[in-house]
Amino acid sequence: MKTAILISGRGSNMVSLLEAMADPDYPARPVLVVSNRADAGGLARTGAVPTAVVPSRGRMREDFEAALDARLRESGVEFIALAGFMRVLTADFVRRWEGRMVNIHPSLLPSFKGLDTHARALAAGVKIHGCTAHWVSAGVDEGRIIGQAAVPVLDGDNEARLAARVLAAEHVLYPRALAIALGAARPAPDAGARILAL
Ligand code: GRF
């Protein structure tokens, strides 16, 4: 499946997806990485995979999304993985890619939709936190869940420590969840399965 990865920042989830896609048996091939910001650090970490910048700032949503859609189609993209893509997509765009677009969110949905998930998890005093890979639907962070990975919240955690623990889980979860979204066989249980539910 010809896949595009959409980013806005450092791109660590993108790197974990690209590493998985380097395996010829993986069901997705990366054909394009798109950022809505020219200064996204991830753009320098794509290796041989082509990159494109489709700027969103100061632009009408519809114009941005028309340009994004055109760029994706130019590269023959069949499937989209959002990976730290920080722009909310309109229902129109989502409908056009329905069933062909997934996202990673840094909380155990449906808890803590939106931004600042780690700070809110700490403020709420939850003892288990984590991340969710899900299909993208018109409601933000509301699409059907593909898989989740849980991490403990430890005494003395601050936002940065908790975020780092969740991010490590994201890097394990997302490539597996994307493979499942693409219809690949469920991965055999292993040590990682203790924290993963796919
Ligand atoms: C990740 O925590 C992702 O879940 C969230 O934004 C962060 C992006 O990190 N949506 P990176 O760009 O993948 O390193």
Image (cartoon, rainbow, N blue to C red):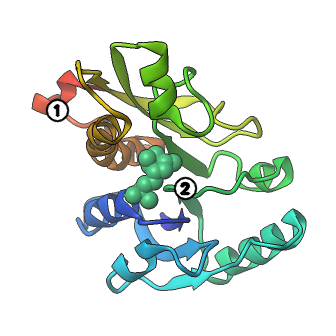
Residue at x 68% of width, y 79% of height: 54
Res. 67 in view? yes
- Pinpoint residue 52: horizontal percent, then vertical percent: 58, 83
Mark pair 2, 1: CA separation? 23 Å
Q: Nearer the viewer, residue 79 or 25?
A: 79
Q: Is 155 rendered above or below residue 12?
A: above
Q: Residue at x 74, y 71 (%)?
A: 56
Looking at the image, the residue that sits furthest to the left is 191
Q: Which residue is mark 2?
A: 82
> Does the residue tagged 2 have its C-beta within 8 Å of any atom of ligand 1?
yes
Q: Which quarter of the rendering shows the C terminus?
A: top left
Q: Identify the residue at image location x=10%, y=30%.
A: 191
| Amino acid on which disc 1 is placed | Gly
Element under disc 2: strand
Q: Is residue 146 above or below residue 102?
A: above
Residue labelled with disc 1: 192
**Side of 3 relative to 78 (left or right):** left
